[in-house]
Image (spheres, rainbow, N blue to C red):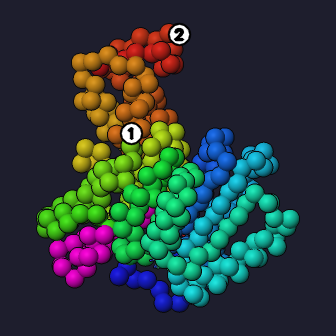
Amino acid sequence: MGGAPRTTVWDMDPHTQAKHELLKTYLGGWFPILSTYNGRIVFLDGFAGPGRYKGGQPGSPLIALETLLDHSYFPSMTQREFLFIFCEPHKGRADNLRAELQDLVQRRAPWPKNVKFDVIDDDFEGTARSILATLATQKANLAPTFAFVDPFGVSGLPMEVLANLMAFDRCELFVNYMVNPVVRFATAENIDDCLKGLFGTTEFLKAPAQGREKFLHDLYERQLKDVCKFSFVRSFGMKNKTGNTIYYLFYGTRSLKGLEIMKDAMWKIDPGGGYRFSDRLAGQDILFTEEDLIPGPLRNALASRFKNTTVTIAQIEEFVLVETPYRKAHIRKQALTPMEKARTITVKRPGRSGFPPGTTVTF
Ligand SMILES: C[S@@+](CC[C@H](N)C(=O)[O-])C[C@H]1O[C@@H](n2cnc3c(N)ncnc32)[C@H](O)[C@@H]1O
């Protein structure tokens, strides 16, 4: 399922680099924000891989660790403990990862005492269940955790386990949802148990022949909101040259700030080689590239959401961040300024220009 390689290490797909850049950019914002509040922070790489690709590129465990070590704020985070948990049930890959980590420790000597890591020779589900059992015995909470769940296919990441793990404060999920196996097998009956686990429901069986991908995508998104109780869930599709989506990266959080950092990261990264990140708004694909940015859907979304009402700039910002693919940075230049010029909105502002806090907009 999902064309998984049989070898210990494998060649990196071109679009994997974009996924890694995204992880790096997001973690660059996430580490310092969480470390302001909490003693311990966990990065859980549920499907860690061998640590390095055949061509020498680092895998997600090294990327996560080096993003922290190289962070300009890291020297001021000595009171925080950072724990990196890497699950890898394939023996050869786990050993390879251990060797890569040893190498990193040597290259970065003296290794900081507040950064710990553990390679677990077990699958994600088993590891998550054992963490949860330990926490239950200790009547303890999971420290703020960023869970990166990056499987080859669709097995081994049951919704129920994600929900239990993510039930704690300030836990976030970044999960790779592979389109092909889900769309192909949703009503084929041969992997029903696996899909039931993935979705946490049997509703995937109702996927229609037409609009199947969207139905299943929306079902997964809804389950992340309803079952995992994330306040905000956004998905980012990785499209290939022919316009087909290979996978969606779903991001689940309860933090508006987290969502803002993730959106900014998404727009910053250009996968290159014909690949594009995308999202949908009112049935239209929005590609995440600043140079191809189409502002029409954003203006239409604002006009229809706030029709005949007067709202604050803060309300507009929250709507755009939570309900649309766009970033906060697009609101003024791409939407409000041209809309004011076209007189489709009237603006009351505290100062002479711009849309500072305290501005109200009538649509
Ligand atoms: C897509 S690769 C991970 C790539 C890695 N996250 C990166 O970005 O460099 C998936 C890995 O998950 C491992 N794996 C397979 N089944 C697993 C399971 N049930 N739980 C955890 N890991 C699993 C595979 O051996 C493989 O190394």
Q: Residue at (51%, 19%) from the top-left corner?
A: 356
The residue that disc 2 covers is 351
Q: Position of residue 281 (x, y in %)?
A: 30, 45
Q: Residue at (40%, 15%) from the top-left corner?
A: 360
Task: Find numbered disc 1 in the image and state the secondary structure of the residue it sits on.
Answer: helix
Could you say which disc has been placed on residue 322 in the image?
A: 1
Could you say which disc has been placed on residue 249 in the image?
A: none
Q: Position of residue 311 (x, y in %)?
A: 35, 19
Task: Let me know if residue 151 appears in the view.
Answer: yes
Number of numbered labels in the structure image: 2
Is residue 40 rendered to the left or right of residue 278? right
Task: Find numbered disc 2 in the image and state the secondary structure of the residue it sits on.
Answer: loop
Amino acid beneath label 2: Gly
Most foreground residue, 130 or 177: 130
Label 1 CB-ligand 1 distance < 8 A: no
Q: Position of residue 171 (x, y in %)?
A: 50, 51
- Does residue 92 sit above or below 161 in this rendering? below
| Viewport quadrant of the N terminus | bottom left
